[in-house]
Amino acid sequence: MEAMAQTQLPDDPTLDEVRMALAPLVARNAAFDGWSKAAVEMAAQQAGVTPEIAKLAFDGGAMAMIDAWFAHIDDAMLSACPPDKLAQLKIRGKIAALVEARLDALAADSEALHRALPILAMPHNIALAAKLGWRAADLMWRAAGDDATDYNHYTKRMLLAGIYSATLMAFINDESENHSDTRAFLARRIEDVMRFERGKARFAARREHRPSLARFVGRLRYHAR
């Protein structure tokens, strides 16, 4: 069976391996059955996995299924944007390529995405939804070569998580050919961030050369001796 061949499960898989193997199949079935036990059962049947094992793999319910699917999308994004491809691009090009690769991976199961977003927006799921957005942003920045460890590490990821979230909203309502409207929206948002980063760099440079009151007072005390 084609679906079974796609899973490539080892003979004695762990629950994590089962979860990752079934994730794209669960998403495919969620388009019809929602993010439900029925989607998991159908995916298990398609992959030749024991239903009880599949149930254990997604013990966290709909959010566990969506989490696993997004992890699958993470892998698809990185596969579509290998280091040698990204190395040829400037930073904005790298980020754009990574976000677009995510959207391309999601496009195959757009109905599953439509069904996932209301679940992610539920009050009791907000914290995990934010964690998934942060995970995606972190992976994209790391793939783009960012190794910042100071406060920039956090601001960059917060900004990118916001860009990705807004672009996702544009994406699900985009009926343009090849999602050209979404790509244009993404380009504008990235340009906004680049403008912000340039402004921040100029401010830091001005601050570095700004007269220091502490140094001035220190000199007064030195000359007073």
Image (cartoon, rainbow, N blue to C red):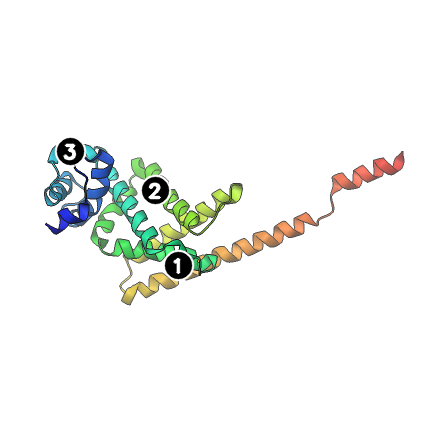
| Residue 96 at least partly seen | no
Give the foreground label among 2 and 1: 1
State the image coordinates of residue 12 (x, y, percent, origin top left). Answer: 18, 34
Q: Are marks 2 and 1 in contact (CB under 8 Å)?
A: no
Q: Which residue is mark 3?
A: 53
Near mark 2 (Cα within 10 A), the count class, few <14, some 14-19 or many ≥20, is some
Give the foreground label among 3 and 2: 3
Circle 1: residue type? Lys
| Residue 37 at least partly seen | yes
Circle 3: residue type? Ile
- Residue drawn at (22%, 34%), measured in percent from left and top? 15
Circle 2: residue type? Leu
Residue 85 tag number:
1
Q: Which residue is mark 2?
A: 132
- Residue drawn at (52%, 58%), measured in percent from left and top? 195
- Residue drawn at (26%, 63%), measured in percent from left and top? 175
Q: Is residue 101 left or right of residue 207?
A: left
Q: Is residue 220 left or right of residue 116?
A: right
Q: CA distance from mark 3 to mark 2?
A: 25 Å
Kindly state the secondary structure of the residue where label 2 is placed. helix
Residue placed most toward the observer, 61 or 82: 82
